[in-house]
Each structure stands twice: as C-alpha cells, then as structure tokens.
C-alpha cells in the first residue's frame, strides 16, 4: 500500500470520531441563530411596551405624549434598546437564513421559532394590559381613555375624531393582533388543529385560548378571521373573538375589584354565557343555514341581489390563505418572511375596515338617548354597546360611573354588550366568514341579553 492509500485510510478512519462533534456544532449553531432572533424580538417588544406603558423607570423620567390619556412614555434609553433590538433582529434573520439541514430538522426549527414568537407576542400583550391593570387596582379606580380632545370638534367631524382616538388608544394591541393573525395564517396546521372541530370541546378550546389574550373586540377580530381562513371552525373562532374581551383574566380581576358585587357577578357570568354559549348557538345556526343553502342551491336557481354581490366582493378581499397556498414554510427564514408579508397584507386590509367601522359606530352613538334609568335607555344602551368599540376594560369605569349616578339598568346592559362585539369587529368577521348572517345573529343575541340584564337591574 503506497503513501496515498495510507493517507486516505487515516482520513477515513478519523471521520467517524469527528462526526458527533460536527453535528453538535451544527445543532448549536441552529439553536444560537434562533435564540438570537427570538431574544432580539423580545428586546424590541419590551422596549415598545415600555414606550406605551412607562413602567421601567420612575414616572418623572418619561416625556409623556397624549392628554389626558398618555399615548407614549418616552425616554432617551429607549433609543439604544430599539437599536439593539432592530440590529439583533436583522442579524438573527441573517443567521437563520443560512441554516441548512434535513427536512425533519428544519421542520422542528420552524415549530420552535413559531412557538417562540407566539409566546413573546402573548407575553408582550399581557404586560401591556397588566401594567395599567395593576395601577388601576392600586388606585381603586380605572379611567376612560381619551388621548385627543375629540369632544371639542364640530359635530360632523366628531365621529372621525372618536375613531382616531380609539385607534390611537389600541394601536399596540392592534399591531399584536395583526402579528398573531399573520403568524396563524402562515403556520396554520400546527396552530388551528385544536380549533378545527365542531364539538363543544373545540369550542371551549377557543374560549380557553383567549383567557391570556386581553384583546378588545376590534383587535381580536383579525385573529379570529385569520384562524377561520386558516381552517379553524366557526364556533371556536367566534368563541375566541368574543371571549378575548369578555373573559380575559385581567378584565375579570378588574371587574371583581372595581365593581359592586352584583355587577361584578353579572360581568363574569355574562362573559361566560356570551363568550361560550351564545357563540356556540350562533355556530350551530350557521351550520344549519349553510346546509339549507346547499340543498337550495342543488334544487333551485341561485338568486343574488346587489347586496349579496357586494358581500361576495367584500369577502373576496379576505382570501388571505390563498397567499400561502402552495408555498412551503420549510425553513425559519421562510417562516419569518412569509409571516411579516402576511401581517402587512392583513394590516392593509383590516385597518381601513376598523377605521370605517369606528366612524360609523361613533356616528350611530350620537343618535342614541343617554339619560334616565328606564326601559328605553336600557334598550338604547344595549344597541349602543353592541355597535360601539372600546379599549379593553373601558366598560368597567363607564358602568361604575353610571352606577354611581343611579343608572343601574343601562350600566348592566353596557357591561355585557360593550366589550363583546362592535361594528368593526362584526365587519371583519363577516368578510372572513363570507357571510353576514352569523355576525348579525351574534350581535342580535348579545343586544337582547344586554336588554334583559339591564331590565333586571332597573
């Protein structure tokens, strides 16, 4: 055997010893890349939530923007945090874009990264809600948010000012909702598997998923719509969308601490009834309507009015799942790019719908009576509460103020109707489900329950 053969033999004999080391190094590189991306995303979210809530430093250290409700808490230390988070995200993406491996290994990395992103977004949302909740508990009261003085605007402009004020107050939660919705559309099979059944257990899973996600109805609707377009069943989608504002943990704690006992019980028990049982009933009715429409379609010519054609055109805008059809999310880099692209497309669609619905709701509210503790004002409060949009928990200080003035009936009606749904929420659900019947039935049942509760508390 010559020297060349000897050299080859030595090399081949040494490779088995090096393979475990090389594999361990490759695995460590993959973990490090994903960790850098997630850590940077967490840092960026942490900086943004402090800008929104101002809890890291003493209150005097912040320059405050917005009055009387503060929109932003600004400090010079936010700049390096944002810079570090942004640069880290760019570096993390560059690292994950270079990762290679077996399909099974890359699939595991995609799952880990997706779960990590969901956890970070939910933790950020919970921090965003928990900070003001803790302040309200310490103060023994919760204020009504108003970031701009829209009440001073001319009457014909006030609905636009009210809508702008609302979106300014909830922009952080709205962005988080869009990010979660875009992610659910991107990684649908793993996210919606527990929400794809039609039974009551799947329905409860939809409500259970909302307990730690304190969204208002307008912020929950994009997530619910995304889940539906990704393959979730209508029942769990409605349960999540309504339970997020009605049954989130922080809201229940605030209701228990800041409302009189009987009204706190109404808010909690009513949240269970509306978030779980009313949505379940609506889902059952929607399935029956769908079956009847299918039979009618087979035996009769389909009749379409201008309203039906307009609904079809509107619903076509929500076919977001088609953007990822046929696209394989088989690497962390593909996950990130597809997720951000879906979020941007979802934002361009949902933001105008939310603003338009908010303007319409604010205009309708101006037509409703607002004085007296009578059956008429209970009915008006139920209608207003079903149509109007509010930031999470705002129904609690509104109801508390009305109770102090003796308006117990309207206060009870608003506790059930205000947080549950709104015109912007219903508009998003109608587009995502390609039908206005289920959202309208949901709104009608919630309004009726609000009227019943209000009459009981007169």
Image (tube, rainbow, N blue to C red):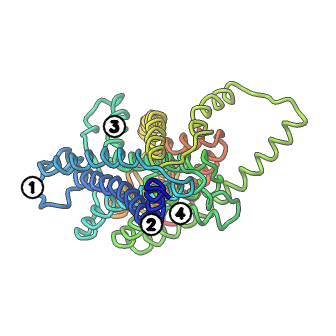
Mark drawn on residue 20: 2
- Residue 362 appears in the figure: yes
Q: SS class of the residue under badge 3?
A: helix
Q: Residues within 10 Å of mark 4 (few under 14, many from 20)?
A: many
**Residue 283 placement (x, y as % from top left):** 68, 54
At 28% from the left and 51% from the top, the residue drawn is: 44
Q: Are marks 4 and 2 in contact (CB under 8 Å)?
A: no
Q: Which residue is mark 4?
A: 453
**Residue 454 placement (x, y as % from top left):** 51, 61
Q: SS class of the residue under badge 4?
A: helix
**Frontmost residue, 430 versus 273:** 430
Query: Mark 1 or mark 4, which is nearer to you?
Result: 1
Number of dots carrying numbers:
4
**Residue 64 placement (x, y as % from top left):** 15, 48
Q: Which residue is mark 1?
A: 61
**Residue 366 placement (x, y as % from top left):** 41, 39
Q: Residues within 10 Å of mark 2 (few under 14, many from 20)?
A: few
Give the distance between the C-alpha atoms of the residues marked 2 and 3, in whole angstroms.
59 Å
């Amino acid at each position: 055997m010559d020297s060349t053969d000897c050299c080859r033999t030595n090399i081949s004999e040494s490779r088995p010893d090096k393979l475990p080391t090389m594999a361990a190094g490759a695995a460590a590189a993959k973990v490090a890349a994903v960790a850098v991306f997630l850590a940077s995303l967490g840092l960026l979210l942490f900086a943004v939530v402090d800008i929104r809530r101002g809890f890291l430093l003493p209150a005097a250290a912040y320059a405050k923007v917005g009055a009387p409700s503060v929109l932003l808490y600004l400090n010079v230390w936010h700049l390096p945090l944002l810079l570090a988070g942004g640069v880290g995200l760019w570096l993390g993406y560059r690292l994950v874009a270079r990762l290679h491996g077996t399909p099974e290994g890359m699939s595991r990395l995609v799952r880990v990264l997706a779960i990590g992103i969901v956890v970070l977004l939910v933790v950020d949302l919970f921090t965003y809600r928990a900070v003001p909740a803790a302040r309200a508990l310490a103060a023994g009261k919760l204020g009504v948010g108003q970031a701009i003085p829209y009440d001073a605007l001319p009457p014909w402009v006030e609905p636009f000012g009210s809508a702008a004020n609302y979106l300014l107050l909830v922009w952080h939660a709205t962005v988080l909702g869009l990010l979660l919705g875009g992610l659910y559309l991107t990684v649908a099979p793993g996210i919606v598997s527990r929400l794809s059944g039609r039974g009551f257990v799947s329905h409860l899973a939809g409500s259970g998923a909302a307990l730690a996600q304190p969204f208002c109805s307008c912020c929950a609707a994009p997530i619910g719509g995304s889940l539906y377009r990704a393959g979730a069943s209508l029942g769990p989608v409605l349960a999540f969308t309504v339970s997020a504002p009605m049954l989130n943990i922080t809201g229940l704690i605030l209701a228990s601490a800041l409302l009189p006992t009987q009204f706190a019980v109404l808010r909690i028990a009513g949240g269970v009834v509306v978030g779980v049982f009313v949505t379940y009933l609506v889902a059952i009715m929607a399935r029956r309507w769908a079956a009847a429409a299918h039979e009618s379609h087979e035996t009769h010519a389909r009749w379409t009015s201008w309203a039906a054609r307009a609904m079809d055109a509107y619903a076509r805008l929500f076919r977001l799942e088609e953007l990822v059809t046929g696209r394989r999310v088989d690497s962390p880099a593909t996950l990130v790019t597809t997720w951000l692209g879906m979020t941007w497309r979802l934002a361009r669609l949902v933001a105008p719908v939310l603003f338009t619905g908010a303007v319409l709701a604010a205009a309708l509210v101006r037509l409703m009576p607002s004085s007296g503790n009578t059956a008429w004002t209970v009915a008006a409060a139920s209608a207003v509460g079903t149509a109007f949009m509010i930031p999470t928990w705002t129904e609690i200080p509104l109801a508390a103020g009305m109770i102090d003035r003796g308006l117990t009936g309207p206060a009870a009606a608003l506790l059930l109707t205000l947080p549950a749904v709104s015109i912007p929420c219903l508009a998003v659900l109608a587009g995502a489900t390609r039908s206005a019947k289920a959202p309208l039935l949901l709104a009608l049942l919630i309004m009726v329950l609000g009227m019943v509760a209000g009459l009981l508390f007169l």
